[in-house]
Amino acid sequence: MARKLEFFFDVVSPTAYLAWTQLPALVERTGAELDYRPMFLGGVMASTGNRPPGTVGAKGRWMTADLARFAARYGVPYRQNPAFPMNTLPIMRAAMTFKDRADFETFLKTVFEAIWVNAKDVAQEQVLTQALADGGVDPEAFWTAAKDPANKEALKANTDEAVARGVFGAPSFFVGEELHFGQDRLDFVESALTR
C-alpha cells in the first residue's frame, strides 16, 4: 500500500514552489500518494510567532542567493518576486475547491509560475485574473471559489490543523505524523516514504 505524503503549502512561499517542482519525480520514485494541503502561511506565522526570513537582513540576503542555488540545482526557472510578500489568501481559498478538480495541476502551475517565474504581483486582482486566463484557468470559476465562505472555513481548518500538528512554515511535509520542513529536506521525506 502506498504511503501518504501530505504537502502543506502556500503559493506565497518560494521554497514551496521549489518543492512543488520536485514532487512529481519524488512521487514517481516512491509510489507515494500525494495529498495537497493548502494552508494560509500568514495565519501559521501569526499563530506560531514565526517571522519571514527577509525580516532579518543577513538571513534574507543569504536566502535570496540560496533559492537561486537550489533552482539551478533542480534545473527549474526561478525569479525573486519584487512584490513579495503578497497576499495569496484568495488563491489559497480557491485552492480548496481546485484541489478536487481535474485541472488542479494546471491551477498550481499557473499560480506558482505567475509568482516565482514571471514575478507577477498576484495580489492585484487584474494581474491575477490575466495570469489565470493566460494559464488556462477559468477566472470566473476561480473567483467564485475564492469568495466561497465554505472555502474560507476549510482553509482556516487546514491552517489550524497544520499549527496543531507542529507546522511553523512552508513547505511542510508529513509522512504519517513525522514532520519535515523545507524544500531542502526532501531527501529526508523520501527516506521516510521508503523505509
Image (tube, helix red, strand yellow):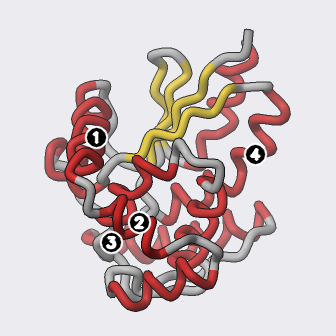
The reply to whether the C-beta atoms of the residues labelled 4 and 1 are less than 8 Å apart is no
Query: Given the current orientation, which residue lies at the most extreme top position?
Result: 1
* Relative to 176, 154 lies left or right: left
**Disc 3 element:** helix
User: Marks 4 and 3, Cα distance to the nearest angstrom?
Assistant: 29 Å
Q: Position of residue 2 (x, y in %)?
A: 72, 16
State the mark number for residue 12: 2
State the mark number for residue 91: none
Residue 63 shows in this picture: yes
| Mark 4, residue position | 24
Q: In the rendered view, would you say 27 is above or below 69?
A: above
Q: In the rendered view, would you say 180 is above or below 21?
A: above
Q: In the rendered view, would you say 21 is above or below 116?
A: above
Q: Residues within 10 Å of mark 1 (few under 14, many from 20)?
A: some
* Relative to 115, 153 lies left or right: left
The image shows a total of numbered marks equal to 4
Between 85 and 6, the one lying in front of the other is: 6
* Relative to 148, 136 lies left or right: right
The reply to whether the C-beta atoms of the residues labelled 3 and 2 are less than 8 Å apart is no
| Mark 3, residue position | 54
Residue type at mark 4?
A: Pro
| Mark 1, residue position | 154
User: Marks 4 and 1, Cα distance to the nearest angstrom?
Assistant: 25 Å
User: Marks 3 and 2, Cα distance to the nearest angstrom?
Assistant: 13 Å
Q: Position of residue 67 (x, y in %)?
A: 58, 68
Q: Looking at the image, is mark 3 or mark 2 earlier in the sequence?
A: 2
Between 182 and 113, the one lying in front of the other is: 113
Front position among marks 1 and 3: 1
Residue type at mark 3?
A: Gly
Q: Residue at x 68, y 21 (%)?
A: 193
The reply to whether the C-beta atoms of the residues labelled 2 and 4 are less than 8 Å apart is no
